[in-house]
Amino acid sequence: MNGLRLLFIAGLFSLSGLSAANTAPSPIEPPYLAQQVAQGDLLAVNQRMPALPYVDQGQTKDQPISGGTLQLLMGKSKDTRHMVVYGYARLVGFNQALKLEADLLESYEVKEGRIFTLKLRQGHRWSDGHLFSSEDFRYYWQNVANNQELASFGPPKVMKVDGQFPEFEVLGPLRVRYTWAKPNPDFLLALAGPRPLYIYRPAHYLKQFHKDFANPNELQQRIDQAKIKRKSWYALHQSKDHPYKFNNPDLPTLQPWMITTYPPSERFVFKRNPYYHRMDLLGNQLPYIDEVVMTISSSKLVPAKTGAGESDLQGRYLRLDNYTFLKEGEPRNNYSVRLWRTSRGARVALYPNLNANDPVWRKLFQTADFRRALSLSINRHEINQVIYFGLALAGADTLIPESPLYRPEYRQKWAQFDIDKANKLLDQLGLKQRDSLGVRLLPDGRPMEIIVQTAGESTEETDVLELIHDSWMQAGIKLHSKPSEREVFRNRVFSGEALMSIWTGLPNGIASADMNPAQLAPTSQQQLQWPKWGKHYETGQEEPPELPAVKRLLELNQQWQHATNMEQRHQAWREMLEIRADQVFTLGTVAKVLQPIVVNKNLMNIPEQGLWNWQPNAYFGVYRPDRFWLRSEGKPGGDH
């Protein structure tokens, strides 16, 4: 991992991002499209691809073959968005070494951390054949993001630095520039995200739904015919403009596959984008796979259907406790089960609500020694052995060893099972009185019973809570769990009704100093340990935090935002990680849990080992599924 760390640090924010090669081999026509080309329905591949394509440097031990259909299983119709996550075509994206590089862009240049010049590829086209140009950026910025009816709150928050949006300039048909008064270290990271920041739109398509461009009579006719609740031009435009949701087959895309099925459906077909900008070292236009078929089923049935051989590539909706069942299906259904690692700070974490409405509990949760006692009362070794077969990494909710910022003490501090020490801390807080069952009493005489809110979606969480219940009882604290639907669950936390909740830990456990440390400070209402403080940061509503350690986290996060060199970013991260380890704002359990990845034995180019996480990996995204290819059994290549 040392090599990965060095690449991560050295390459994340280079002054310019260049495509994988400055020269490209002659492009080779995919057989899937050859007939359309022969009939004159489609341009030849050398006319479809950019003048300077992205040349993928990945190697494969066998000669890849273009063709075949990949079967996926998903649990909801809205999971069509995962074809954007997996497809991972980005203006700027992470490669497999987690190094940022230009992708859809030919190159980019960053000056002073605040001036970003983006250069597009000459001849790059949308999936419908129209040229991708600076007009697509101008249209989005001027006619969408800054249109009061389409975007009442203006451009995305990440485009604002200290309350100011950038100056946007069109420098030519293929060049645009964004200039902020101060550095914006989040900009490139947002472009590379699993849910990318879209700062462009297919203007040639969307203008027909925009009042500033469309013929008024034709536009009104489209509004009248559209199946939308609000009969207005902007509602119509919004209904057509969902590049991330990926649910409009008419919306041109730059992803490797384009959706061809209109919702609602239980079977979505994605066909290869004939104008995709990447090729391999031999000149084969990517993606190798012609079609992806996504079948929608109940999420609870995905493991069973995967074990029956109904998916060629499956990670989503699988858990470690499915492993034995999935292994049993290997010889019958021609797949293999690989074990990757998750890379969140904790697989499961408890979140004491420091903004709870109950004044007695709120005071306790805002007391560091009480949180420390709760953490010391969790038997993480037992959780690891009983639920994760001893194969996970026990400890606090913090970075994992694959992060260049990792230190063992962050994971170990206040995370050893020590009931004697926990009881001593609780006694020192004056919580010595107990009832007849041995449960401690709160200062107002109520029994110390903590109700942990759950989203009711995971038996894994239930199993973890049962073990914590037993160890907390040794400290005189009784735990109850209360499941509810996810929306109700979150609303209870946000309102302060919930005392404690359970969810996954830090979103990105492999962060580097170049990545925003906002996950460590109260910067979002979605952070379950301090939702009201997060809402204050986002909107100015609710009261700001008064705890010195929490205020310091916000100060350090701001210092990182304004840092002018790597040393300052490192220092901000270090102090924030130290505060988090000492203050125990969340209660981690284990990390690096094994994640089953089911792979059809004829599906090639997928790593044996990998990291499975939303951020920054985009699950399969950084491993470039456009490079995956299918071969027929017993043959070097062919249809699937």
Image (tube, helix red, strand yellow):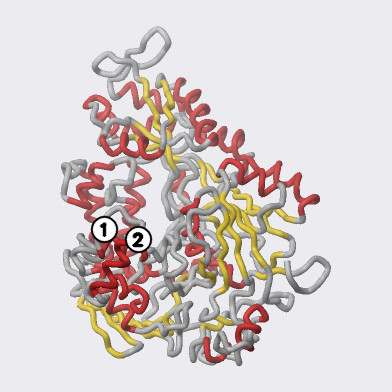
Dot 1 lies on which element? loop
- x%, y% of residue 299? 55, 44
Residue at 58% across / 57% down in the picture? Answer: 294
**Relative to 248, residue 398 above or below:** above
- x%, y% of residue 344? 47, 51
**Neighbours of disc 1 within 10 Å: few (<14), some (14-19), many (20+):** some
Q: Quadrant of the N terminus?
A: bottom right
Left or right, 192 with respect to 546, comes to: right
Point out which mark residue 231 bears. 1
- x%, y% of residue 199? 33, 72
- x%, y% of residue 358? 24, 26
Dot 2 lies on which element? loop
**Three-letter code for the amino acid on which mark 2 is drawn:** Ala
Task: Kindly indicate whether the residue at mark 1 contacts the one at mark 2 (C-beta within 8 angstroms).
Answer: yes
Point out which mark residue 226 bears. 2
Q: Is residue 183 visible?
A: no
Q: Quadrant of the C terminus?
A: bottom right
Residue at 35% across / 61% down in the picture? Answer: 226
Q: Residue furthest right?
A: 634
95 and 509: which one is in front?
95
**Three-letter code for the amino acid on which mark 1 is drawn:** Lys
454 and 136: which one is in front?
136
48 and 557: which one is in front?
48
418 and 541: which one is in front?
541
Tell which circle, 2 or 1, labels the residue nearer the N-terminal end.
2
**Relative to 579, residue 30 above or below:** below
Q: Quadrant of residue 490?
A: top left
